[in-house]
Image (cartoon, helix red, strand yellow):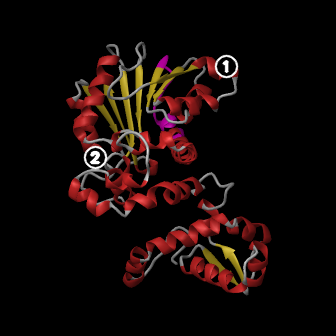
Amino acid sequence: MADSNAITVTDSDYLRLIIHGVTAFELLRTALEFDLFERLEQADGMTIDDVASAIEVDQQPARILLLGLASLRLLEKRGDAYVNSAVTRRKMLRGSPRFLGPLVDIQAEIINAGIGDFAESMRRNTNVGLRHLDGPGTTLYERLTAHPRLQEIFYANMGDASSKALTQLRTLYDFSDIRHLVDLGGGDGTNSLELVRHHPDLTVTVFDQESVTRLAEARVDDQDLRRRIAYHPGDLFADPFPQGADAILYFHLFEIFSPARNTRLLRKCHAALPAGGVCLVYNFVSDDEGTGSLSAGLVSPYFLALASGEGMTYSPADVERAVLAAGFSRVERHDNLGFSHTLIVGHK
């Protein structure tokens, strides 16, 4: 380990992490299930016997768990006691602003079952992994409507990711001149709540599937915010977009669809906006060279094998081309943002 922000491994260990990736994930997930990181932090370190007693397992299973977590550099040894490593303190404690628990939940409960069909999804060029989840429709988003608990897990992760990314977007882009914004695929309403809280003259319409808009509306108990957020259920491709907005937020949508389908949706955005309106395409992206980031490379198979059968983590150049092809006269591109995001603003 070079320092608290850089973990180095040998070539052989790097391949071991790939080959035994499922086991590495289960070590982490199991630690969260037993609240182990929280217990270690509160106790300022625990021995094997301490851990076995605290989580009510025998010594041998506790030893196996601690060995695995320490080998992954999630724990460190201090004398006879195990303590959380720096990366665990930053991202695996529930009180941390960078806590990744919701991402672990969606991976465990939804993604892992279907990602094993990646090769067959490549052969058929469709989301074969969706076969593990029954329900209506041909996308994960539609199937989740038949599984309320899984839908809640899914949108808890999406909301968590959106909250972190939107804070950055608000810093980057000035929303003060926007009066009415449509949040396409607005999910659990995290974006809308964040925006109206910080911009008292702004109203937002959340456009998403009916079951999702119900989920979003149920989260709002402040009467002033309720008056400023509308919920418009509908299908992105089949139904018209809400009218009267001067801005459309196209947030974490681009990676779901093919370039052609994104261009089609962006044309609908263009048609729904007045002259001078803007479409804010804010997305998780890869680099333009197609070599990274690691997150982009690891997330993309999910979109093919499970989510929609056609998307991936695209490059900023891909997004720019689609926005221009949709008819927008000018684009602004803001690169090198945190969380591997890029903002493309299409001006009508």
- Looking at the rendered structure, the number of numbered marks drawn on it comes to 2
Q: Which mark is residue 224?
A: 1
Residue 23 appearing in the image? yes
Q: Is residue 22 above or below residue 331?
A: below
- Tell me if residue 348 is in the magenta stretch: no
Judge from the rendering whether residue 289 lies leftward or rightward of residue 220; answer left or right. left
Point 39% across, 77% down: residue:
19
The front one of 31 and 42 is: 31
Report which residue position mark 2 lands on. 310
Q: Position of residue 5 (x, y in %)?
A: 53, 67
Q: Which residues are magenta?
A: 167-180
Point 51% across, 38% down: residue:
166
Q: Quadrant of residue 217?
A: top right
Kind of residue at badge 2: Glu
Q: Is residue 225 above or below residue 255?
A: above
Q: CA distance from mark 2 to mark 1?
A: 40 Å
Point 53% across, 76% down: residue:
72
Kind of residue at badge 1: Asp
